[in-house]
Image (spheres, grey):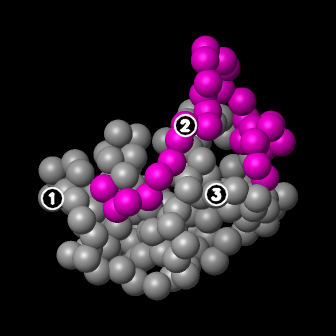
Amino acid sequence: RNNYCGPCALAYVLGSDPDSAAALLRKASGKRSIRGVSNGHLTEAIWAAGVRMRLAFPIGNVPHPQLRRWLSTREDPAALYIVNITHHYIVVHGNQVFDSRFHLGKPLEKCPYLLRRVVNAWRVFPPVIERNIFLSVSSLQY
């Protein structure tokens, strides 16, 4: 089972499982195994799955804030975001954080990553899906 942060973040956004998400990332990257994921491959896989998103950070040439500070400046605190924090992907959805350690979510105030720097963040506009429903990779158009 693939339990790396990139596939786990993608799986949450798609309402899928990490192994199916890793298959999409293999298609996007051309790699045989998925451990580290680039921002480009992650965004390509998300777009290929039909999910739309836009860059929420950085906008312009600004320093990278700590996650705690970035959270307080989110455009919509209830929205879904994929956040790249210093070599790690997390999903922030409302007041919860999800990643390869916290599959069921963890309250933001108890998040161990609050002092990490935000490198990139994308606001995700997913289709209406039920979380934790496994999607077949073959059913997604690439």
Mark 2, residue position: 55
Where residue 70 sits in the image (x, y, percent)? 75, 38
The segment highlighted magenta reads: 48-77
Quadrant of the image occupied by residue 40: top left
Say what amino acid the circle numbered 1 marks. Answer: Arg
Give the x, y percent position of residue 1.
34, 77
At label 2, counting other C-alpha atoms closer than 10 Å, the crowd grade (few under 14, some 14-19, many 20 or more) is few
* Lower sequence index among marks 1 and 3: 1
Q: How many marks?
A: 3
Check if residue 140 falls in the magenta segment.
no
Which quadrant of the figure has residue 136? bottom left
Query: Mark 1 sits on what residue?
Result: 32
Q: Outermost residue toward the top?
A: 61
Residue on which the image places disc 3: 80
For the residue marked with disc 2, what is the amino acid?
Leu
Return the x and y of residue 2 as percentages of the image width and height: 35, 70
Which residue occupies 23% across, 51% down?
Answer: 28
Task: Report the mark closest to the observer, 1 or 3.
Answer: 3
Residue at image point 55% right, 37% down: 55
Identified at 32% across, 47% down, the residue is: 44
For numbered disc 1, what is the local secondary structure?
A: loop
Label 2 – label 3 distance at C-alpha? 12 Å
